[in-house]
Amino acid sequence: MIREHIFPAARATLVTLVLTGAAYPVLCTGLAAVLFPHRAAGSFVPDESGRIVGSELIAQPFASAAYFQPRPSAAGDKGWDASNSSGSNLGPTSKKLRERVQADVARLKAENPGAVGDVPAELVTTSGSGLDPHLSPAAVRWQIARVAQARQVAPERIARLVDDQIEGRDLGFLGEPRANVLLLNLALDRLLGKPAAAPAR
């Protein structure tokens, strides 16, 4: 019985474990490192001095008025915690969600007195992961007046930079146009220099 059943089952288990638990992951990791080294390494983003300041896949907060702000995050106690990715799990009937959104809308309007139109919904709602690094073109453009005022440049100059940073749909039809907030803020620094007393990123 052992020879007929246990040994074949053990061999099949061992072969499957080696193929799917070792060989396949090593092969995929090796191919990714060769074909897509930047992506395989975590899509880290350096600043102009070569210092790694983040990943283009993970949002991070920007407190200064001279930078574009990401959408809010419920990941971790302070938000944007890549080790604690999550949404708020608050539903549309949640009083807590309604109060937070109302407070965020009031804050954003106070911080962006030159913004035109209503506050874009994504600036007051979290993503499912809490780590979404992108904003829609509308949500980025809504912040242009504040950023331009903080940097003491014409809004048109910031608008041109934003237009250059908008990413199109993948393969021309997948997803929506978007802007990566970290890459956009780094482009701001390259164009205009870092603002005085900019917070560390």
Image (cartoon, rainbow, N blue to C red):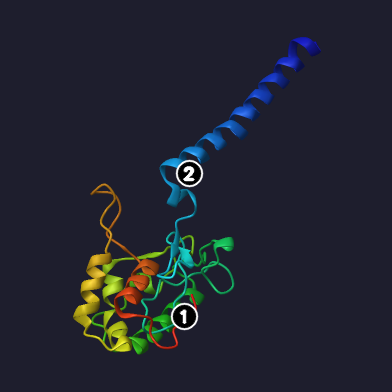
Which numbered disc covers residue 151? none
Determine which quarter of the picture holds residue 184. bottom left
Q: Nearer the viewer, residue 166 or 125?
A: 166
Q: Is residue 84 left or right of residue 95?
A: right
Quarter of the rendering occupied by the N terminus? top right
Q: Considering only vertical position in the picture, is 87 above or below 142?
A: above
Q: Residue at x 22, y 75 (%)?
A: 159
Residue that mark 1 sits on: 99
Of tags 2 and 1, the one toward the viewer is 2
Residue that mark 2 sits on: 33
Q: Could you say where residue 169 lies in the image, as x and y percent from the top left?
A: 26, 53
Determine which quarter of the picture holds residue 110. bottom left
Q: Considering only vertical position in the picture, is 177 above or below 72?
A: above
Amino acid type of the residue tagged 2 in the rendering = Ala
Q: Tag 1, which secondary structure?
A: helix
Q: Tag 2, which secondary structure?
A: helix
Q: Nearer the viewer, residue 126 or 29?
A: 29
Q: Considering only vertical position in the picture, is 39 above or below 117?
A: above
Q: Could you say where residue 44 lies in the image, as x and y percent from the top left?
A: 46, 59
Amino acid type of the residue tagged 1 in the rendering = Glu
Spatial separation of the CA atoms under disc 2 and disc 1: 46 Å
Q: Earlier in the sequence, mark 2 or mark 1?
A: 2
Q: Residue at x 63, y 26 (%)?
A: 16
Q: Nearer the viewer, residue 7 or 156?
A: 156
